[in-house]
Amino acid sequence: MSREQMRAADADRQRVAEQLQAALTEGRLDLAEYDERLQRAYAARTYGDLDRLLNDLPNAAPVIPSPPQAPPAAVHQDGLTKAWLGHIWGPWSKTVVFFTLIWGLGWFFSGGPDFYWPLWIIGPWGVLLLLRTAGGLAQGEPRKHALEDEHRRRLREHRHERKMLYREAIATGELPLNPSKQQRKAFIAEAMARGDLPPKPRRPAG
């Protein structure tokens, strides 16, 4: 695959936008040209699309694809465990702080010590969380949580890319301004068949 056909990243689109801003400042583009090219830059899918926005600007440098990062080694289990524990115990910790603050204010204004009544709330909840923590660690919940987080991140990226394709198709007249559900489905199917849009990420298996 040639460089011009390679898919551009958001960072590449941002670098082109910065070069267009510089060209506007230098007077090489007027405001209308800048606005039109900026919209095309953010809608660009490939490096070829980005190159065409800079070809007639003498001081603009073509965007060079970053070398693909080596797949990271498996995240250390301690890191996964800490992230999962933060997810599980975070709401409990915030609740402890909240009710302790209320109890402390009551103690301060009443002028004397009072029974720590938040214990009736955070105590049973904490016991349940301890049981969940023990069971979750035994069943590999930290890894499952990390996989779910990654799946959600990929879904967000897929939705963003799909919206960009919709906008470009509407701008070029490939889709009407308010496409029907059937038109959107047909457009997405064609985009996936052309390789313009990857398949929707699948939920990881347990």
Image: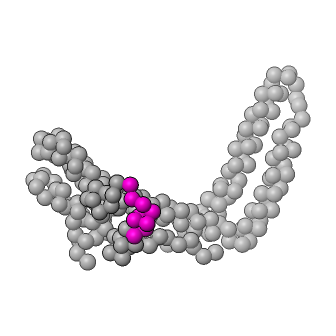
Question: Residue at left 21%, top 51%?
Answer: 37
Image position, residue 134 (x, y; %): 77, 65
Q: Does the magenta-highlighted stretch encompass residue 183?
A: yes
Kindly tell me whether residue 24 is visible in this rendering. no
- Name the residue: 84% across, 49% down: 123
Above or below, 44 against 198 in this view is above
Q: Quadrant of residue 40?
A: bottom left
> Compared with residue 29, is residue 196 higher up or lower down, i.e. above or below?
below
Q: Would you say residue 138 sits in the magenta stretch?
A: no
Foreground pick, 22 / 161: 161
Vertical side of 54 occupied by 121: above or below: above
Quarter of the picture containing the C terminus is bottom right
Report the residue that reaches farthest toward the right.
115
Q: Main secondary structure of the magenta part?
A: helix
The magenta stretch spans which residues? 178-186
Give the residue drawn at x 75%, y 62%: 133
Q: Which colour style is shown?
A: one colour
